Image (cartoon, grey):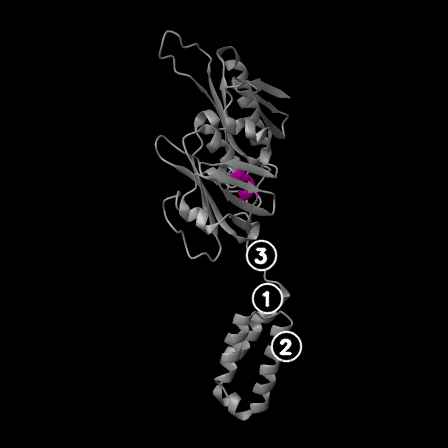
Amino acid sequence: MAELIGKNGTWTFDGDLLRVVPGHDKDVPRLRAALGEIAIPLAALAGIAFEATPETSKNAKSGAGRIRVRLRAGSDPLTQACGGRIADDADPYQLDVPAERGGVAEYFAEEVRDALTVARIPSDPAGRYLVAPPPVPISANGQDGTGSFDGDVVRLDWGWLADLKKRSAGNREWPLSALEAVEWRPAVGMDWGWIRFRIRGDAGIVSQNPRLDPNCLTLWGTKKESGNSAVLAAAIVGRMPHPNAAPEKPSPADDTAATAVATAAAATPAAAGSDHDALLRRLRELGDLRRDGVLTDEEFATAKQAVLKQL
């Protein structure tokens, strides 16, 4: 067991699992504290490095630096949700190392590298999340409201600072299956941050301005806001379909629907003219398939139109 105690947390590695535990000091960034302990399986790791702090001043101490791990693409919902926009001091996959533990950090990094070499962990993107998403229920405050997620439903509840357009649209609520994407941006300087929800079949964003978009919770200028909202985004993204997952095979019902539509469309005028009764039977079959839920209304209408053209 290798252990490394840094300025803002503790890392341990047992050969199979790297555990990242945040510190309890008041200066620990809110994002790290909100995430709590993170368990990173060896299969999710792509590399590790200890970077010594350059001795650029008389006060710099030899051996101090920062250790950081690099994760495989697609293995971690937090990284997926935040897209590399987390500040270094709040990044849970970095640890500041004091001068007296510089040698321990080098040893720790070597232990992880040796384990990666022996295990021959692939470098290609992961097809599923290997790091668990943050637990639910979870909520985060923004400038104009509160976002929450209970594992099934995402909600945006507006506060009194919300723009009239958002309050007129009312509080928002979507099942997880309705989400197409989640976008997170931290508040930086005088620029607004946001967590925005892209909804399947939605007509589009009402406004690029996050203060006016009713599918968007705005963040303004505090690490407390940005940190909690990043954890909320990770909790949601980690429970959505993985972007690298293989497409699901169609169910037998889907195959039946596709066959019905294709068969109807492939009917020829000659066949229609020689067997009028067969086409009428086909129309009845299509009606039965719609009644049984095999065909959607849209698929039924398409197939029916193809048959009617042959009568």
Q: Would residue 121 be visible to someone looking at this image?
A: no
Look at the image and give the residue range highlighted in magenta: 232-238
Q: Residues within 10 Å of mark 2 (few under 14, many from 20)?
A: some
What is the three-letter code of the residue carrying label 1? Answer: Asp
Q: Earlier in the sequence, mark 2 or mark 1?
A: 1
Disc 3 designates what residue?
248
**Looking at the image, is mark 3 or mark 2 earlier in the sequence?**
3
The type of residue carrying mark 3 is Glu
The residue that mark 2 highlights is 288
Residue type for callout 2: Asp
Magenta: predominant secondary structure element? helix
For mark 3, give the secondary structure. loop
Q: Tell me residue 11's x, y (percent).
A: 58, 23
Work out whether 171 lies above or below 220.
below
Q: Quadrant of residue 24?
A: top right
Give the Cα separation between the discs numbered 2 and 1.
15 Å
Position of the N terminus by quadrant: top right
| Gap between marks 1 and 3 measured at Cα | 11 Å
User: Which residue is at a point 43% across and 41% down the rendered structure image?
Assistant: 162
Question: Real-space Cα distance between discs 3 and 2?
Answer: 26 Å
User: Where residue 75 sits: x, y (%)?
Assistant: 54, 39
